[in-house]
Image: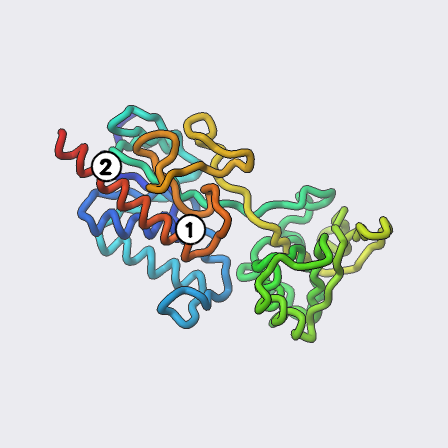
Amino acid sequence: MEQSGKYDVIVIGGGPAGLTAGIYLSRARLSTLILNIGVAGGQMILTHEIANYPGIESISGYKLASTMKQQALSFGATIKTISNPPQIIDKGDYKIVQAGENSFSAHSVILATGGSPRMLGVMGEQQFKGLGISYCATCDGEFFTGKNIVVVGGGNSALEEAVSLSRFAETVTIVHQFDHFQAFPAYIDEAKNNPKIKFIMETEIREFAGSDKLEKVLLHNRKNDSEEWLNIDGAFIFIGYQPNNMFVKDLITLNDREEIIVNEDMETSVKGIYAAGDNIAKKYRQVTTAVGEATIAALAAAARTWELKKKN
């Protein structure tokens, strides 16, 4: 396989962590390649509104992602789109990253691959994905104008997106498996004070059904073990994210949740490979935490890379 390019640092992932790393590295005058699957911005572009990013009163996730991307490009970073997760080969002082027919090398690599929406894994979910089942309120909310929908989940994302979806839907019913929410009080209050939002607690969805599109869900009450069908037009699922780390499971150490274990410099079990964002083992997952972790990873990778460049 031909060498397609030699860089100082390669960042895998173009979400807030990957773009932040690209900004810091390229501004430090290190040749930086960002490899990204899909549109740059990661899960951030699926967020209707970001109102807790310091220094910015309110901004859409898509707009913030676009600004970050332009910053990285303006400092000299190269962004390439790839179709599938790459293969990383550790050669000690340098790493080889194989992406399809292309092969790149760098002294350091930063993994900022984020996560993918977690699925319920129940009957009918695969069948009706895109036919009534969605994992992105920003992408699909408008399609359900005047419709009756359910939102599955009880964390910050579920309640925040339920409020966002109420701008379009006739009714929004939040279905949650516990008798309480795992969200900040402000999000809970906002949802409870919204006249369009209803709640079905201690309940799970066991099946999605319909003909050409989703038409109903089977609800299982965990408290009394009863079941009933609920007629709906759509379902939005917000139950967390699965880290996108399986492509490196044989190279670096993951925990039992498939998250990357890092040290205080965001370095993984392999020297010269760093990680930041929603793919690492941590408690809180926010744009701001991803940005902070990526800053540390970029500074550590830059220090290592400059040392190796001096040696060579």
**Residue depicted at x 75% and y 58%:** 201
| Residue occupying the point 79% across, 59% down | 231
| Secondary structure under the numbered disc 1 in the rendered image | loop
Q: Nearer the viewer, mark 1 or mark 2?
A: 2
**How many dots with numbers?**
2
Q: Nearer the viewer, residue 58 or 214?
A: 58
Check the picture and name the quadrant holding the C terminus.
Answer: top left
Q: Which is more toward the observer, 76 or 92?
A: 92
Q: Disc 2 marks which amino acid?
A: Arg
Does residue 97 show up? yes
The image shows residue 76 at horizontal and vertical percentages of 22, 50
Q: Is residue 84 above or below residue 225?
A: above
Q: Quadrant of residue 310?
A: top left
Of helix, strand and loop, which one carries label 2? Answer: helix
Q: How is the image coloured?
A: rainbow
| Circle 1: residue type | Val
Furthest residue in direction front, as rendered: 264
Marks 1,2: beta carbons within 8 A: no
Q: Quadrant of residue 233?
A: bottom right
> Where does residue 4 sit, x and y in percent of width and height?
26, 33
- Label 2 crowd (10 A; few <14 / some 14-19 / many >=20): some
Q: Position of residue 49 (x, y in %)?
A: 48, 66
Picture quadrant where residue 257 is located? top right
Q: Position of residue 44 (x, y in %)?
A: 45, 56
Q: Is residue 13 left or right of residue 245?
A: left
The residue depicted at 69 percent of the width and 72 percent of the height is 196
Where the N terminus falls, by quadrant? top left
* Dot 1 crowding, Cα within 10 Å, few <14, some 14–19, many 20+: few
Q: Is residue 164 visible?
A: no
Residue at image mark 1: 39
Residue under label 2, please give it. 304
